[in-house]
Image: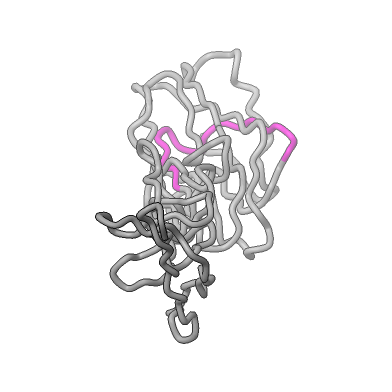
Amino acid sequence: MGDGKSLKFCAKTDVEGMGGPGDRAPQRWPFPVPLHTHHTPLCPPAVHCSPGHHYNTTTHRCVRCPVGTYQPEFGQNHCITCPGNTSTDFDGSTNVTHCKNQHCGGELGDYTGYIESPNYPGDYPANAECVWHIAPPPKRRILIVVPEIFLPIEDECGDVLVMRKNASPTSVTTYETCQTYERPIAFTSRSRKLWIQFKSNEGNSGKGFQVPYVTYDGWSRVVQARQRPVLPEQGFEG
């Protein structure tokens, strides 16, 4: 061409047989682009990957974004790392909202505090396992308030919150649920110390919970009228 430029047709990519397990079949780019005399032609990527994927220039295929990353746009050659102490449940995430806070558990305050499911008030992550310990000073008891709790029932109790005296399955149990309750409840711990565990599976997720507690003088008349237990078969230790 008289202007010193010519046209080069970017090669068509044969999309058959390129998609591995979990990979998306790429789209073709069969159109001409300018070819400058002294420069490499700037052909677009051979494939146009969908959200949740990135183009791998070595294998020349669309690959799902790994766990802990996401990609909301088409035609990208990279994935975006989740911010802070967050990660995704699975690969192939398409939005930053899929990045969930994984932190939970720990030793709680002597007099007041709260526990909450990881990523609250967003949906908690899959395969979470959190353990908290409450150990009040001598002669103090624990009063717990559950304003509401959201655990999906579709998983047949795959997500469970339990409060016991200690980690032993046979220890005194104060509270245990795998369901959603939107009515507030309050109760006194059946033991002076509490071991609390929350576990989720790979199935459905939910908003979870934020549960405050306070400790009080066990001899105080203000709270001697103990709350009705959460489950009919549960009573309280003296």
Can residue 168 be seen?
Answer: no
- Residue extending farthest to the left is 38
Quarter of the image holding residue 223? top right
Q: Quadrant of residue 45?
A: bottom left
Residue with the most extreme right position: 183
The part of the chain drawn in magenta is: 182-197
Q: Is residue 188 magenta?
A: yes
User: Where on the picture, by quarter, is residue 61?
Assistant: bottom left
8 sits to left or right of 224 = left
Question: What residue is at 42 percent from the left and 38 percent from the top?
Answer: 194
Give the quarter of the figure containing the N terminus: bottom left
Q: Is residue 8 left or right of residue 232?
A: left
Tell whether position 55 is magenta.
no
Q: What residue do we see at 53% from left, 56% from top?
A: 51
Residue sitting at x 40%, y 43%: 82
Residue located at (53% from left, 36% from top): 120
Residue situated in front as seen by the camera: 95 or 137: 95
Residue 108 pos. (x, y %): 37, 29
Pick the front one: 121 or 43: 43
Spot occupied by residue 193 in the image (x, y as percentages of width and height): 40, 35
The picture places residue 209, in percent across and down from the top left corner, at 58, 38
**Image spot of residue 72 (x, y percent):** 53, 49
**What is the total number of numbered labels drawn onto the structure image?**
0
